Amino acid sequence: MSERLDLLSEIAQEARKLGCTEADLRYVDRRLEWVTVRNGRLQTCSDLSDAGVGVRVRIGQATGYAGCPSSDPRALREGLARAVAMAKASNTVTYETMEFAPPPAEQGVYITPTPGGDPFQVPLDQRIDRLSQLASALKTDDRIQVANASQVMMRRHTLLATMHGSRIDQTITLNGGGMSAIAEDNGQVQQRSYPKDFEGNVLQGGEEVFDSLDLPAHVDRIREEAIALCHAPPCPEMRTDLVIDTDQLGLQIHESCGHPTEADRALREELSLAGSSFLTPDLLQKEFKYGSPEVSLVADSTTPLGPGTFGWDDEGVPAGQVDLVRDGIFRGYLTSRATSKRLGCDPIGACRAESWHSEPIVRMVNINLEPGSGGSLDDLIAGTDQGLLIQTNRSWSIDDHRLNFQFGCELAREIKGGKLGQLYRNPVYTGITPEFWGSCDAIGGLQDWRMWGWFFCGKGDPPQIMHVGHGTAPARFRNVQVRAS
Ligand SMILES: [Zn+2]
């Protein structure tokens, strides 16, 4: 354990003399790099790094938080004094009892395995060259107007020391990327992305994560599908069965299960950014039917490759697996120590902060849909008489209670007699969360179960971003409303 961790522990102990019942000092050193090549030119080359210490204390019924952009002893003691002053002042206006679950006392080290090597050690010019080759290969047809290829990498080193004896050292490395082609033809503009829209797929691991995306193998397909979509008819308006591929289903899980099971939303403590939740605590007692018996959704901070995997959360609660939905029944929440106390359950370790300057808040870990008995994606299609295969998100919208949603996707294909047919552009499907998950009658098996990373989940006020994961197989949903955007 480092000298820095010793210093954080020492100052956490000093907080006792200042009247604190709890004190956490969390050092974070973070580096985030994003490189994008567009049409043969370097579009973005952002390399952000910051380091500092977040001090959280508890006095009476209130907490205080201070961010210190330095980790020298004098700055930390000043930060502690600011956090103490804030907590004392907050006690005069605290409007209700805010208790915490008992403080953990954990010690250990977590380091992301990087069997393919440290991605930050690959020279920047090599990484830019790799992306340039992809973007150029996408643009070999004049109808492709925009060709993008990008890589996102992050390393976060965290040291957490608490007054109650936690001493934790964690280094998390994320890596990934993706590409997209925008075609203009036949009066239409259409996009295809791989492995998914926006940041691509960003997972926990080293250089092997980027290699495993195997982007060159998908260049021709992405280019040709973008052009073909320009000539495809719009998605018909109808109710039909949907086979949803994993790149879209991950976002469906994120918006309609991940966010509504955040305990702070359910307790009405977090209402900004489409903030509330229909999954109110009384529904836990009522064994609310969230979905069909096929549907089991688990918060799992131990899943290999998952961007929401760690040894401990930012309160020092150890990683684990907790049911959110089991066999279709609503079973639990994503909790911090404070929200778990209010709900009368144990904290699951889902409290994380973007960096040292941000207070930890309730955050998704990896929210995974358990695999089912539906076999492969091909098996699901073969078992569907009439319907659509839907792939790759393009837009999303969901109400503040996370009930009514609408997702636009890049591509739909007709399924007829168990076979793929007509391509459709601009598909949109809509639904109401429990009805939609209630219509799920088949989930694919492990062979097509895949981990998807979302790097930029936004939450909080002031906003914080966080990397979260969603493991899922493709699944089938009966009688869903679709139309074209
Ligand atoms: Zn989100």
Image (cartoon, grey):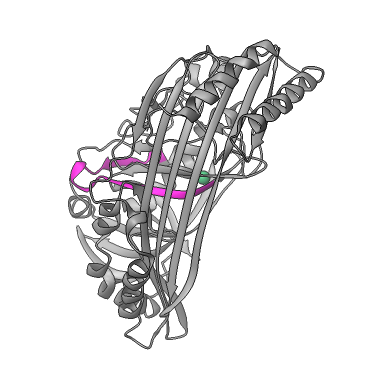
The residue nearer to you, when weighing 246 against 187, is 246
Is residue 259 in sight in this rendering? yes
Could you say where residue 240 lies in the image, as x and y percent from the top left?
36, 54
Tell me if residue 441 is in the magenta stretch: yes
Q: Could you tell me which residue is drawn at 37 percent across and 55 percent down?
A: 120
Could you say which quadrant of the image residue 90 lies in? top right
Could you say where residue 387 lies in the image, as x and y percent from the top left?
31, 57
Is residue 432 in sight in this rendering? no
Q: Residue furthest right?
A: 92
Could you say where residue 21 lies in the image, as x and y percent from the top left?
63, 12
The residue nearer to you, when weighing 77 against 93, is 77
Q: Is residue 344 above or below residue 142?
A: above
Q: Is residue 152 above or below residue 14?
A: below
Horizontal relation, residue 110 to residue 372: left or right: right
The residue nearer to you, when weighing 269 against 397, is 269
Q: Is residue 315 above or below residue 152?
A: above
Count of numbered labels shown in the rendering:
0
Could you say where residue 117 lies in the image, as x and y percent from the top left?
26, 51
Horizontal relation, residue 474 to residue 98: left or right: left
Tell me if residue 476 is in the magenta stretch: no
The residue nearer to you, when weighing 272 against 373, is 272
Q: Quadrant of the N terminus?
A: top left
Could you say which quadrant of the image residue 137 lies in? bottom left
Q: Residue furthest bottom?
A: 142
Magenta part of the protein: which range? Answer: 437-457
